[in-house]
Amino acid sequence: MTDTPPSAKRPRTPLRTAVGIGTLILAICLNIAVVQSFGGIEAVADRLAALWGKAPGRMPGGSRLAINTKTNGPPPMTEAEALSFLQKADLGDRYAQFRAGIIYDNGLGGVTKNTAEAVRYYKLAADRGERKAQYNLGMLLHAGREDMPADDAQALRYFILAAEQNDVFAQVTLARFYKSGNGGIPRNPAESLRWYQRAAQAGDAESLAVLGYYYETGTEGLPKDPAQATTNYLAASGKGNAWSNVKVGVMYLTGTGGLQKNESKALALFDAADSSDASNALAYLAWIYADGLYGIDRDETKAAGLLKRAADGGDAWAAMKLSNYYAHGQGGLPSNPALAVKYLKQAADGDNPIAERRVGLLYEHGFGFPKDEKRAAALYRRAAQQGDADAADFLGAMIQDGRGGEGRDEVEAIRLYRQASKGGSAKAMYDIGLMCDYGLGGETRNPDQAMIWYRKAAAAGYPPAKRYLAAIEAQQPSVKSAPAP
């Protein structure tokens, strides 16, 4: 989701050196061991040098557009109101049964919370067709409680019942769950799109915004259609969707999407988003101010404040970026390695692939966390499945060595290296060179092909490849030997 105009200023700050990052890591580590895998400590240092490098200037959200799910909860209720609903519920009133479920679910009107009673009353109303009870019961079954395990199969059933009755909350919930494969509900992009479309037809702002993004990028089964994307963003913004407010604000700043340039309208929309608690919109604004995009003056202090609010509101991209700020002491924030690690972990838990890869690296080598290669491999796999090239390379190295609970499989390792190289991983290019040089992973030994990959890795900036090529340039071709695998 990178629609940076030609006028955008995107300052390039070099990554910290391996030594500087090593100093930071020393400050947060409980213990550090010299790691000999992946070519020894130099190769590890090369990887650590990028650990808290500045996050890519890519807009937050992307194909995993963040959505806010905060609700204010039910309004308070007097004891007399609660008693009235409970009496009517016991007489068979369907709506009163739904309200009785809310009473026990939330402990309203002086009634003690009781999950079993909440489920019982919700189910009485839901099985008689009360769509709000179907939705609430689905949410309760999906979340589970200490006294009741989650049941996603039943939750899905009730969500569908409510959604088919045009309950917009249920339609959006189904769309989200099918998009991400939440809990025991299987990922189903086609069903996700269908329910977003149903909810958008009913005027749901979130669904309009999500479909706008799909039309903008031509993803998730929709054709690329800039005009339709603009229509959706404008409709969502008009309904108060904070993320779309920022999107439309950018259009006014740049005069795109068929809108005339209008800085005052743009800034008014930015202010509206800034005044919201929508973490995805706050992250979007932080990205703009951090990099000084679309003619907006660069302001890292403002960006830091927005990142903190967005990260504390649950936005994974913001948490990753905030981790960088605390690592480097940017934006008026103090250098704080403990908070850097905390927010990095939060971002990984939020399924941010870059954070997953970085936390995996910490677990793999026991930096800041107890060494846990199995957890590292799982994090690398999750990140690689989301397209992170370096994570695919790191996972390939573990599989090549048979570490992290992964069986030793050189063929799978080189497959991952090739996947990573297509994504631009310089280290993966070097690793493919090694496999060709030594005839590993089912490859026929081919020193000439290996040299092609070493040169690719060096051109992409991988230091060990540069050092190796520099070393052999001083030798006769006849005495060339492969680098240590």
Image (cartoon, rainbow, N blue to C red):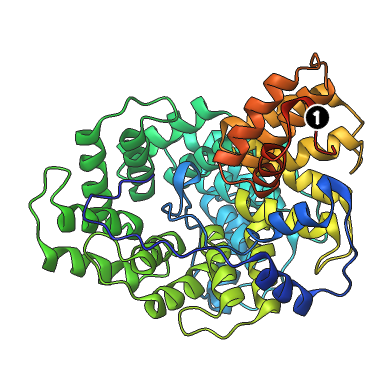
- Residue at image position (33%, 60%) is 242
- Residue at image position (68%, 20%) is 449
- Which residue type carries mark 1? Val
Residue 50 visible in this rendered orientation of the protein? yes
Q: Position of 443 compared to 235: left or right?
A: right
In the depicted view, which residue is nearer to us: 77 or 87?
A: 77
Which residue in the structure is indicated by mark 1?
Answer: 479
Residue 154 visible in this rendered orientation of the protein? no
Q: How many marks?
A: 1
Q: Quadrant of the N terminus?
A: top left
Within 10 Å of the Cα at label 1, are there few (<14), some (14-19), or many (20+) other Cα atoms? few
Q: Position of 92 compared to 272: left or right?
A: right
- Residue at image position (83%, 21%) is 441
In the depicted view, which residue is nearer to us: 363 or 200?
A: 363
The vertical placement of 133 against 178, above or below, is below
The vertical placement of 187 against 19, above or below, is above
Coordinates of residue 272 in the picture (x, y in percent): 27, 69
Coordinates of residue 360 in the picture (x, y in percent): 76, 53
The vertical placement of 167 against 343, above or below, is above
Q: Position of 93 compared to 396: left or right?
A: left
In the depicted view, which residue is nearer to us: 208 or 142?
A: 208
> Which residue is the extreme one toward the top?
444
Coordinates of residue 170 in the picture (x, y in percent): 50, 43
In the depicted view, which residue is nearer to us: 243 or 250?
A: 250
Coordinates of residue 205 in the picture (x, y in percent): 33, 49
